[in-house]
Image (cartoon, helix red, strand yellow):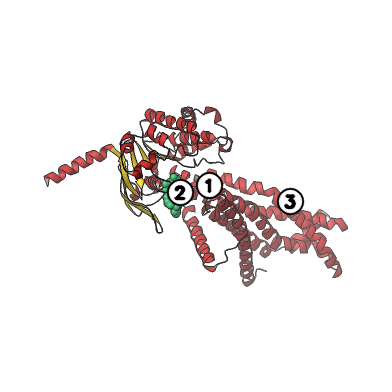
C-alpha cells in the first residue's frame, strides 16, 4: 500500500515536469487506422521532433493534441489538463498557451499582416489596449525580421516570408508549448535552415517547449533534443539524433540516408 | 454544373444542410456575438451588391414596360400600364430576380471564400485562436444575407419602377406623380407583405447554402470552385421552391 502511494508520488513528480503526456492514443478515419496506441511525453523546455513518412499521421497527432480532431480513445494531458474532457471555454484557455504553426501557414488572406497578428491577441485576451497590441505586433515582427511587411497582404509575400509571418502569429501569445507542423517543408534548404535557427532563437528567448514535426533531416539534426519515430501509428523508436543514427534497424536507418 | 443526381447523395446533402441550418439557430442566439464582423458583412454583402441589383432592376422595369405596352393597347387598357408593371415587379419579379442575382454574386463569393479558408486551414487557425469559426464566419454571413436581401429588394423595386416610369414615357406622357399614384393605388398590403417576407427567406437560403457549401468544401482548388458553383445552382433552385411554397400559402390565406 505504502509502496503504491510512493510510486504514485513519484509519478506525479514526473508528470509535473512533463508539460505534455499522450498515452494510448487511437484515431482512425473509417477503416484507416492512423494512430494506433501512440505514446509521447514532452518535458519542460524540451524540443521533441516527431519523425515519420508522409501520410503516417503526424498532422493528425498534433491536431488531436490541440483539440481540432477528437481521438477515439486515449489520454492527452497538456499543462496538467485533460484536453478531451474540456468544454469549449476551458479548451480556449489551454489553447491560448499553445502555439500552432500550420503546415500550410493558414494566414488569413483577407487580412493584412498586422490584422493577422492581432487576431489571436484580440481573440484570446479580450482586455488589451491598442497600445499593447501594437507593441506586441511590432515585437513579434521584429523577432522574425519582417517589421516592414506590417501593412502588406499575405498574397504579396514570398513562401519563406509567409512562413515567418505565420511563425510570428504563432508566437505572439508567448505560448508555453509550440507545435510546429513541418516548418521547413516547401522551402529551399537555406531558407529552411534560417527558419529552424529562428525557431531555436525564439525558443531560447521565451523558454517554451516544442513538438516539431519534420522529415527534413537538417532540421531534425539542428533542432532535436529527442526524436520520436512514428510508424504504423505507433511510437516505433525514440532517442537522440546520434542514438537513432547509430541504430542498426533498416526502418530507422532509411530516414538518415 | 452538376446537381446531386444520385438520390442517396441528394438526401445526404439535404440532411447535412438541414443539420447545418439547425446549428445556425443554435449558435446564432448564444453569446459571444460577433457584432463587428456582422456589421462588416452587412456592408460587404449589402452595399457591394447594390450597384448590380440597381442596374438590373432598372433595365428590367424599362424592358418590361416597353414589352407589355403592345398587348395592353390591343385590349384597350394602355392606361393600366403602370399598375400592371407595378404589380408584376413588386409581387414577383423584383424579389425573385434580385434574389437570383444575389445568389449569383453573394452565394458564390461566400462559397468560394469559406471554401478556400477551409482548404488552407484558415478555419482551423481561427478555431485555435479562441474563435468559434461557425459563429464568426457562418452566423455573421447568414444573418447579414437574411437582413440585407429584403433591403436590396425594396431598393431594387424602387429603381425598377423608376425604369418603368421612363419606359412609359418613351411612347406617351405621364407625370411622375400620376405614375406613382397609379402604381400605389393598385398595390395593397397583401401584395407588399408576402413579397417582403419571402425575401427574408431568399436571403437566408442564399446565406446558409453558400456557407454550407464552403464549410464542407472538398480539398484542393477544384473543391473551392465546386463549392462556389453549386452554392449558386442550389440556392437558385431553392429560391424558386420557396417562391412556390409562399404563393401557395398566401393563396390559402387569401392574401391575393
Ligand atoms: N480529415 C480527414 N479525413 C479523413 N482522413 C484523414 C483526414 N485527415 C487525415 N486523414 C488521413 O490520415 C492519414 C495521415 O494524415 P496526416 O495528414 O496526418 O499525414 P502526415 O503524416 O502529416 O503527412 P505529411 O507529411 O504529408 O503532412 C492519411 O492517410 C490521411 O488520408
Ligand atoms: Mg502533415
Per the model, the C-alpha gap separating discs 2 and 3 is: 39 Å
In the image, is residue B221 above or below residue A99? below
Per the model, the C-alpha gap separating discs 1 and 2 is: 23 Å
Query: What is the chain identity of the residue bearing mark 3?
Result: B
Cβ(mark 2) to ligand 1 < 8 Å? Answer: no
- Of A140 and B98, which appears nearest the observer? A140
In the image, is residue B211 above or below residue B130? below
**Which circle marks residue B117 in the picture?**
1
Query: What is the chain identity of the residue bearing mark 2?
Result: B
Residue A251 locus on image (x, y percent): 35, 45
Instruction: Say whether disc 3 or disc 1 marks the residue closer to the N-terminus.
Output: 3
Residue B155 locus on image (x, y percent): 69, 52
Q: Quadrant of the N terminus of chain B?
A: bottom right
Per the model, the C-alpha gap separating discs 3 and 1 is: 31 Å
Q: Is residue A20 visible?
A: no
**Which circle marks residue B31 in the picture?**
2
The answer to whether B150 appears left or right of A149 in the picture is: right
**Which circle marks residue B196 in the picture?**
none
Amino acid at each position: 500500500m505504502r509502496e503504491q502511494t510512493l510510486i504514485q508520488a513519484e509519478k506525479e513528480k514526473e508528470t509535473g515536469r512533463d508539460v505534455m503526456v499522450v498515452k494510448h492514443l487511437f484515431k482512425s478515419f473509417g477503416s484507416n487506422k492512423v494512430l494506433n496506441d501512440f505514446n509521447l511525453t514532452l518535458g519542460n523546455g524540451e524540443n521533441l521532433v516527431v519523425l515519420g513518412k508522409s501520410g503516417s499521421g503526424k498532422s493528425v497527432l498534433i491536431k488531436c493534441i490541440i483539440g481540432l480532431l477528437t481521438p477515439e480513445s486515449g489520454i492527452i494531458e497538456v499543462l496538467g489538463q485533460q484536453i478531451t474532457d474540456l468544454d469549449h471555454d476551458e479548451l480556449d484557455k489551454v489553447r491560448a498557451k499553445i502555439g500552432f504553426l500550420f503546415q500550410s501557414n493558414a494566414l488569413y488572406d483577407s487580412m493584412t499582416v498586422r490584422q493577422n497578428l492581432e487576431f489571436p491577441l484580440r481573440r484570446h485576451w479580450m482586455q488589451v489596449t491598442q497600445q499593447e497590441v501594437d507593441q506586441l505586433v511590432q515585437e513579434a515582427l521584429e523577432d522574425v525580421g519582417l517589421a516592414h511587411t506590417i501593412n502588406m497582404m499575405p498574397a504579396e509575400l514570398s513562401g519563406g516570408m509567409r512562413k515567418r509571418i505565420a511563425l510570428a502569429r504563432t508566437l505572439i501569445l508567448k505560448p508555453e508549448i509550440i507545435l510546429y507542423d513541418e516548418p521547413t517543408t516547401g522551402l529551399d534548404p537555406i531558407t529552411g535552415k534560417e527558419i529552424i535557427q529562428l525557431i531555436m532563437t525564439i525558443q531560447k528567448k521565451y523558454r517554451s517547449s516544442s513538438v516539431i514535426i519534420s522529415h527534413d533531416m537538417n532540421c531534425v539534426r539542428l533542432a532535436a533534443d529527442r526524436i520520436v519515430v512514428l510508424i504504423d501509428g505507433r511510437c516505433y523508436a525514440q532517442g537522440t539524433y546520434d542514438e537513432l543514427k547509430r541504430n542498426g534497424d533498416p526502418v530507422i536507418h532509411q530516414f538518415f540516408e | 454544373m452538376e446537381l446531386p443526381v444520385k438520390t442517396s447523395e441528394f438526401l445526404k446533402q439535404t440532411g447535412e444542410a438541414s443539420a447545418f441550418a439547425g446549428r445556425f439557430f443554435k449558435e446564432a442566439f448564444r453569446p459571444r456575438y460577433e457584432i463587428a464582423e456582422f456589421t462588416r458583412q452587412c456592408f460587404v454583402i449589402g452595399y457591394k451588391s447594390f450597384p448590380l441589383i440597381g442596374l438590373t432592376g432598372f433595365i428590367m422595369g424599362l424592358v418590361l414596360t416597353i414589352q407589355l405596352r403592345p398587348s395592353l393597347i390591343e385590349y384597350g387598357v394602355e392606361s393600366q400600364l403602370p399598375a400592371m408593371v407595378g404589380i408584376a415587379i413588386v409581387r414577383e419579379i423584383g424579389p425573385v430576380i434580385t434574389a437570383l442575382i444575389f445568389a449569383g454574386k453573394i452565394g458564390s463569393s461566400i462559397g468560394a471564400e469559406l471554401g478556400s479558408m477551409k482548404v488552407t486551414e484558415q478555419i482551423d487557425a481561427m478555431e485555435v485562436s479562441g474563435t468559434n469559426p461557425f459563429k464568426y464566419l457562418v452566423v455573421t454571413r447568414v444573418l447579414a444575407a437574411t437582413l440585407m436581401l429584403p433591403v436590396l429588394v425594396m431598393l431594387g423595386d424602387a429603381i425598377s419602377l423608376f425604369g418603368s416610369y421612363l419606359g412609359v414615357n418613351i411612347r406617351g406622357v405621364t407625370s411622375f406623380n400620376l405614375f406613382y399614384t397609379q402604381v400605389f393605388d393598385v398595390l395593397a398590403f397583401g401584395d407588399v407583405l408576402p413579397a417582403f417576407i419571402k425575401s427574408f427567406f431568399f436571403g437566408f437560403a442564399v446565406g446558409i447554402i453558400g456557407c454550407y457549401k464552403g464549410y464542407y468544401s472538398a480539398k484542393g482548388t477544384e473543391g473551392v470552385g465546386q463549392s462556389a458553383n453549386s452554392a449558386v445552382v442550389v440556392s437558385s433552385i431553392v429560391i424558386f421552391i420557396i417562391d412556390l411554397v409562399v404563393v401557395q400559402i398566401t393563396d390559402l390565406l387569401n392574401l391575393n
